[in-house]
Amino acid sequence: MARARSTPADDTFTLYDLKIEVVATERPMVCNHQAGAFFELKGENLSLPPGQTFPIYPLAALLPLLPAKQRVTHPHDWMTTDTEIACPDPHCGGRFRIIRTGTSTFRHADVTAVPLPAPRPARPRRRAAVPARTRRGARR
């Protein structure tokens, strides 16, 4: 399972690796993608198998969803449960299945020039407020 947080002493974080595969439906595919074609995403790097192409219009529709799919989400969140995305062409029956295939760990310092914020000093815990007692027989 991917970790959602890091500390300045340990600036690592984990993302899911993804495989995005073209899935045929009962409707014909009119775009330039073939059932079984795929690309993979590991961190920020997208890769295609040698010699394979992928049309830019469905790629443009998929790209905004992929960073969220790489991260840990609540089990009831639609981003966790919904794995197939329809082709953006309303006449095309193609769908794209997003599969979490594994995880990769990255260091914050290796992927950005922005430093992590300094740790905050621990604050003392407050005691819970005790409700005022009401007088016996008093009306509210």
Image (tube, grey):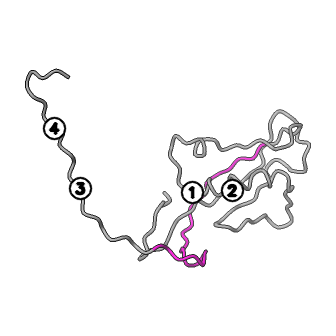
What residue would you read off at disc 1? 71
How far separated are the C-alphas under marks 3 and 1?
Answer: 33 Å
**Do residues under tags 1 and 4 come within 8 Å of each other at their CB atoms?**
no
Which mark is nearer the camera, 2 or 3?
3
Give the magenta range: 95-117
Q: Dot 2, crowdedness within 10 Å: few (<14), some or many (≥20)?
A: some
- Nearer to me, 13 or 112: 112
Residue 96 position, x and y percent, is 75, 47
Residue 133 position, x and y percent, is 13, 34
- For marks 3 and 4 on the same chain, the one whose residue lies earlier in the sequence: 3
What residue lies at 18% left-to-right and 39% top-to-bottom? Answer: 131
Task: Look at label 2 and name its amino acid.
Answer: Lys
Image quarter (top left, top right, bottom left or bottom right) of the C terminus: top left
What residue would you read off at disc 2? 19
Q: Dot 4, crowdedness within 10 Å: few (<14), some or many (≥20)?
A: few
Which label belongs to residue 138?
Answer: none
What residue would you read off at disc 4? 132
Task: Look at label 3 and name its amino acid.
Answer: Arg
Q: Is residue 25 left or right of residue 113?
A: right
Which mark is nearer the camera, 1 or 4?
4
Which label belongs to residue 126?
Answer: 3
